[in-house]
Amino acid sequence: MRTGSGSAKAMAMACTGASEALAARLRAGPLASDPAREREEDVRRSLHGFLHKVEQDSDGDRVFAELDCILAGNAKDLYASSVLSEECYQVACQIARQIAERCSAKEVYALTTDALHDFIHLDPIPWPAVACVATALGAALCRIPCKKKHLYIANSFKLHLSICRRASAFLCSVASAKREKTETEAAPSLESLTAIAALSRTFDSISTAVTDGVGISSCCKGKLKFHCLRLLGVIAPIPAEGKMEDALSDWCSSLCEALSDLGMSRLDAFTLGPRDGVTDEEDSAEEDMAAGEHLLGASIAVEHLMSDHDSASRVLVEDAGDAQDLIRLGTHHLDAMLKSVEQLGEGGSDMQQVILSKALHLLYLFASAAEERNLGETSPGDASNLSPSTYPGRIMSRLFAIMSHVEDRRSRLQAKVCMMAVLKALSPTRRRQVVLEAIQETRECYPSIAATLLSFLKDEVASAWPSGDGASSSSAGGSNATSPFLDASVLDCILSPIYELEGIDLDEAKDHLSAQGDLLLSSLNAVRLIVLKQEAEKRAQGSASPGFVLLDKPVLERLLEQSMACIDRMVQVSVEEEREDANHDHHHHHHHPHH
């Protein structure tokens, strides 16, 4: 017995110094000087010796006494010793596990939570020590009765949040430092590996508590859901590069599984408000932060559910109602996320980027799901689309703003892809209405977006064009000419930028062309497509029947005699002015003359 306690004492003595070593190490940076290395050897030998004794000793009571002695006197030093080297970290974790498996789980939980609290507020944070503590906490939690596990987790919310926020910030800084260094990448440091381990242990504990949870009250379920969503949001900015990619996807899966165990349906993710999880004492900055984290987490959870084809979650998407409900949900979410981007203000630019990118990706998923839904219906949901819903219009305005004001090029492209997806998700009649309205809305202030929409319109006309094959074509033409895109309103919209030129003074020609050039180009392209289609049909039909006609003779004559002449004059005036301003040759209207 005496020898046992002696080894615990020796261990205790070896470890007592470890916290000093920790302090010294944090002050001195890497273990450069020899005494520190000897110190590491001392501690490592003691740790190994202690673990060996404990594992060899067959007397359960004695082992318990020794472990308990360390727990009571030196738990924190033990965890701290793991910063000395990777080997110390590994052995300290094994001893921490032994203690958590043999001593009172409640006591371990209380002492380790205290230690964790201290470590996480040091600067810099000793990640190996944090990971070691998280290992002990996880092992202790496994021994707590199922009915109570979730309460222990609920009491550790703030601690989890601190660990995740700090680990996330640390891993982000490691990633950006790695990007700046172009040399071959070094193996990840013990710090990075243990920061990742600390996150993994934390998420494991949460999913253990939720999976084993018995009789969790609905109020507590709400809090746990909100908590999981926030943690998802906190880890979202970590770049998924190298080793991180697998880790991130594991964490995301384990939190999403915990959410579905808690009965999280897809719609919940949006409606769970901060009030379900945030206590009143938190200040408003914290509340904004919580709302941002929650939103981001919600979008990741929903993204996970929507892209997970083989789980029950797919059913949640199926239950979401018709295509329009999906678009409505997407809009609701985009609104909320854009609001949180605004709230983050100047400081949160990285986070803003992440939120915006996620919001757009999610909207794209909703729109694609809606398009599938539309294609799956026997009649393309026209009844639901006759009531002009404000949703596509509102989404479109949001997307226009992103396409025209956001600096990040990727986000602008993402918004454009989203816009196309949203349009495709609507039924043809509704799509025509939304595109025509959108072109009206953007012509003056965002002519290049209007040009994109006009090209979209041109493609719709091309795919709706009746296919002429021989004699049957007039009847085929008859049936297909009912497509909403082969309609006078569409033609008016295509011609309007060209007709508009007729009323413009030649003095303003150059300014007008520079502002509206893209739109005019799209418009001319669309007219060209229609003329070519009609010509091709005329040739195929011979003179017997003219085939399908969208541009009739009077319109063509007006285009030829007035509009084209007008464009010619304007281009000429512009070119002359351009020659005069030859020194300002960075104006780029020289691509118009070839029309």
Image: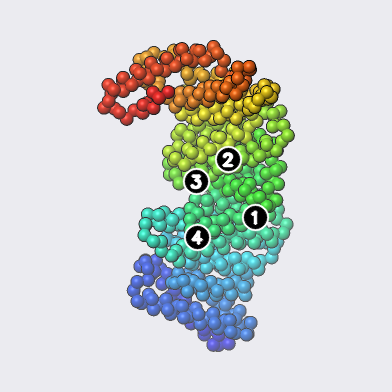
The residue carrying pointer 4 sits among few (fewer than 14), some (14 to 19) or many (20 or more) residues within 10 Å by Cα, namely few
x and y percentages locating residue 377 in the rendered image = 71, 36
State the quadrant of the N terminus: bottom right
Query: What separation in Å lies between label 3 and label 4 (alpha carbons)?
Result: 20 Å
| Labelled pair 2, 1 in contact (Cβ < 8 Å) | no
The residue sitting at the bottom extreme is 2
x and y percentages locating residue 521 in the rendered image = 45, 25
Q: Could you tell which of marks 2 and 3 lies nearer the N-terminus?
A: 3
Q: Which residue is denoted by mark 4 in the rendering? A: 243
Q: Could you tell which of marks 3 and 1 lies nearer the N-terminus?
A: 1
Disc number placed over residue 31 in the picture, else none: none
x and y percentages locating residue 523 in the rendered image = 49, 23
Query: What separation in Å lies between label 2 and label 1 (alpha carbons)?
Result: 23 Å
Q: Which residue is denoted by mark 2 in the rendering? A: 364
Type of amino acid under label 3:
Val
- Mark closer to the observer (2, 3): 2
Type of amino acid under label 4:
Lys
Q: Is residue 248 visible?
A: yes
Q: Which residue is denoted by mark 3 in the rendering? A: 354
Q: Could you tell which of marks 2 and 1 lies nearer the N-terminus?
A: 1
Q: Which residue is denoted by mark 1 in the rendering? A: 257
Type of amino acid under label 2:
Tyr
- Mark closer to the observer (3, 4): 4
